[in-house]
Image: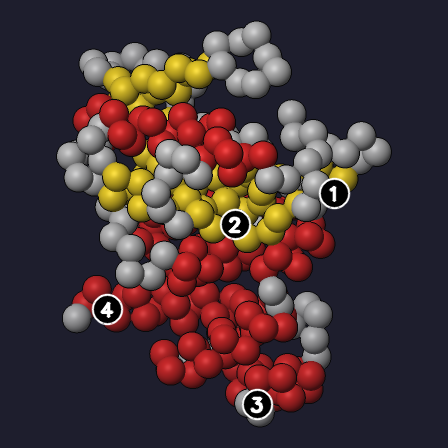
Amino acid sequence: MVGTRIVDLRYKLMVTELLNLAKKYYTYRELSQLIGLPETVLSRYVKGHVLPTIERAQDINKKLENIMRIETEIQRRIIFDELGYFDNTKVISDTMLLERAVQQAVNKFAGQRVTKILTPETDGIPLATLLAHRLSVPLIIAKKTREVGVSEFIEEIYIPQKSAMVMSYYVPRSMFRKRDCVCIVDDVIGSGETQRALINIVRKAKAEVTGIYALISVGQEWKSQIEDVANCPIEVAYKVPEMTPTG
């Protein structure tokens, strides 16, 4: 019962944060027409004077998702240069947007058992941390170097395409248990090689990948790297239609 109340409270707070974001683009009058609630009620929610009931929060969230789609918000924030590289700093540093992505991931993987969140040592850590917190499960970070003090690692070695470098990811073996259900989280899926390496780590741990979630994907090439080894849902918030350099 206590756990349910905590989950409901987090959800209500997330919805009020989403209302605050919506207020940047719409007046109270416009929001009132879009959501179907009086301006005075919306104002109390936005200012934090009162929280909506869980039923009302769910209704507000559903309506706001239709008018403030997360892919549109990500598109507004990523900046492309003349060479095709993009800067997603304003995406990964926007905690309110990341909370929305967390809610999307929770909705997409509803019904899937998740006991661990796994992310590579990169810009996906903030998102993975928030999702692990929301689900109340441990966060595992795959690092590129071994850490002193850890006696046993699971190591995955791979050679990125179009490079002559050997790359490795390391995860303390003690972080996994057999039959763990792992969700892999990242900020960007480019070639798909990083995600494939993480899938192999999970398999070496005798665990199962139950989902993959990313904020942004680039092109279609990554699918050939992942789909043949991942028998699980793969969800992306915003898809860059054509392959562009990502470093």
Q: Is residue 83 above or below residue 92?
A: above
Disc 2 to disc 4: CB gap under 8 Å: no
Which quarter shows the N terminus?
bottom left
Residue 126 visible here: no
Residue at the spot 26% in from the left edge and 39% down from the top edge: 208
Which is nearer the N-term, disc 4 or disc 3? 4
Report how far apart the C-alphas of labels 3 and 2 lie in the structure: 30 Å
Q: Is residue 62 above or below residue 209?
A: below
Which is nearer the N-term, disc 3 or disc 2? 3
User: Where does label 3 land, which residue?
Assistant: 36
User: Where does label 4 land, which residue?
Assistant: 4
Residue at the spot 52% in from the left edge and 82% down from the top edge: 44
Give residue 83's position: percent from left, percent from top.
80, 30
Q: Secondary structure at mark 3?
A: loop
Report how far apart the C-alphas of labels 3 and 1 lie in the structure: 35 Å
User: Where does label 1 land, which residue?
Assistant: 79
